[in-house]
Image: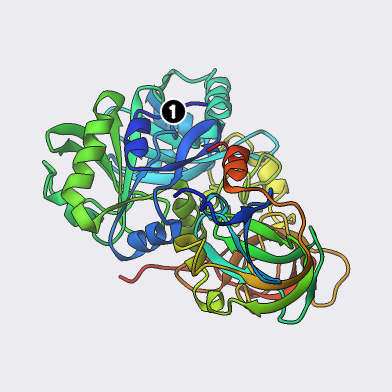
Amino acid sequence: MLRTPLYEEHQKLGASFTDFGGWEMPVRYGSDLDEHHAVRNSAGLFDISHMAEFAVSGDAASFLDYALVSKISELAEGRAKYSLICAQDGGAIDDLIVYRRSSDFLIISNAANRAAVGAALASYSSNFDVVINDCSAELSLIAIQGPNATAILQSQASIDLAPLRYYSIAEGELADIPVSFCRTGYTGEDGFELLVDNRSAAELWAKLLEFGGDALNPCGLASRDTLRLEAGMPLYDHELNSTLTPMNAGLGKVVRFDKESFVGKDALARRQDEPPQLHGLIGEGRRAARADYEIFEPGGQNPIGKVTSGVLSPTLGYPIAMALLAGSYAEGTELEADVRGQRVGYKVTRLPFYKRGK
Amino acid sequence: MANPDHLKYTKEHEWVSVEGDVATIGITKYAADALGEIVYVDLPKLGSTTTHMKICGEIESTKSVGEIYAPMDGEVVEVNSALESSPDTINQDPFGEGWLVKIRYTELPDLLSSSEYDAFVGE
């Protein structure tokens, strides 16, 4: 299994590890519920160095308008956009974030899809004068998320972080270590993702924990998953896969059909209203329907869909789930999940389940 | 934490403490750690009968679901109802306050000693 440059730091902190997309990653350090609540109430620190990074330079704006479903050329310098890369049949190869830097674009995509994204970018680029550099092996990514994240960083940052809006990127130093400050995240909280050279990653991690003190908890992938689920954010291979379009996953607003051409446009236009559709569900009691559990209309014998992710929400205290259903069900519709042989009542709700206060 | 010497163990990662004809059952620290933070426990009802190696309950963490296998035939004479409101007690004190049920058994199966269980989980 692959390891990030922070593996030894995790070992020192007593982490339990799990295989995630071929990477040996910390799943928790102590209690995953404590780690979850730390992010909602103070701040959490995540190693997400397994994520893949691609730098695209040259005629990159036009190329990315063609390769991705969004209009990347509209992105101002220093800003970022959530987007997807699709195949010609409209199926999602990955979801990703594009950052516009001063002289190039940076794409951050999922670890497990690094090869697929790299191959798609290369094949889509044949008519463009661009250079695509997979820099995943040189860069580490450390996320600091939660209401206290900015204050913890600001004390040691060389730049003023306050003017940096959500979905922005800026270069600077943190405790004299060069980093890119990306104001993005996967938890539903304010915070940053810090891009850093592998050689400085362990030093940065240790310094962040030192500055953060009691206000900052190292957090594993277990809490990252429950946090993103509460925030209604898709996880590839759960809410997204190569057979699903962005519209299936409720991400239709990311697709810009007003662009002249982009990979997958014709198929996506044709598949606009096709089922399944991603829904948010909230359940009764405390038993959570988990991924792959079937969903039914009340008393129904034929499943109308399946849960893609589900958990007893640590913040809300009741079961939440995202599910792909064969049709569109209005908010408030009562449904049932088969939880290991027992029917549990679930109700359709609007996503996200959790939204941070302003 | 070591697996206490005075307890017996099953390969389903349960511990058994026998006093007279009643056995107290819990899950081991190894099992609790593997599950992660426990958020829900479904225990058998008071007075219900248990059958050796039949599922009699569930333990859920945020990440997974574990089944409780009855370690022996018998009748449930006490359940740890405190776990309903604080299931994470199992993580904090698996060999003590985190016990699950007490069973008045009819016959005890072969159980592992602490050193046999240590070897089983590779400790």
Q: Can you say which quadrant of the picture contains the C terminus of chain A?
A: bottom left
In the picture provided, is A290 more to the left or to the right than A14?
A: right
Quadrant in the rendering for residue A31: bottom left
Quick check: A247 above or below A285? above
In the picture provided, is B107 more to the left or to the right than A142?
A: right
Q: Position of residue A131 (x, y in %)?
A: 41, 18
Pointer 1 residue: A3
Quick check: A197 above or below B117? above
Quadrant in the rendering for residue A315: bottom left
Q: Position of residue B30 (x, y in %)?
A: 54, 49
Quick check: A20 above or below B48? above
Callout 1: helix, strand or loop? loop
The chain ID associated with circle 1 is: A
Residue drawn at point x = 36 percent, y = 38 percent: A10
Packing grade of label 1 (10 A; few <14, some 14-19, many >=20) is: few
Q: Nearer the viewer, residue B90 or A219?
A: B90
Q: Residue furthest front?
A: B20
Q: Position of residue A331 (x, y in %)?
A: 63, 76
Q: Nearer the viewer, residue A310 or B74?
A: B74
Q: Position of residue A211 (x, y in %)?
A: 16, 48
Residue drawn at point x = 67 percent, y = 65 percent: B58
Q: Can the viewer see residue A162 in this picture?
A: no
Residue drawn at point x = 67 percent, y = 55 percent: A291
Q: Nearer the viewer, residue B79 or A314?
A: B79
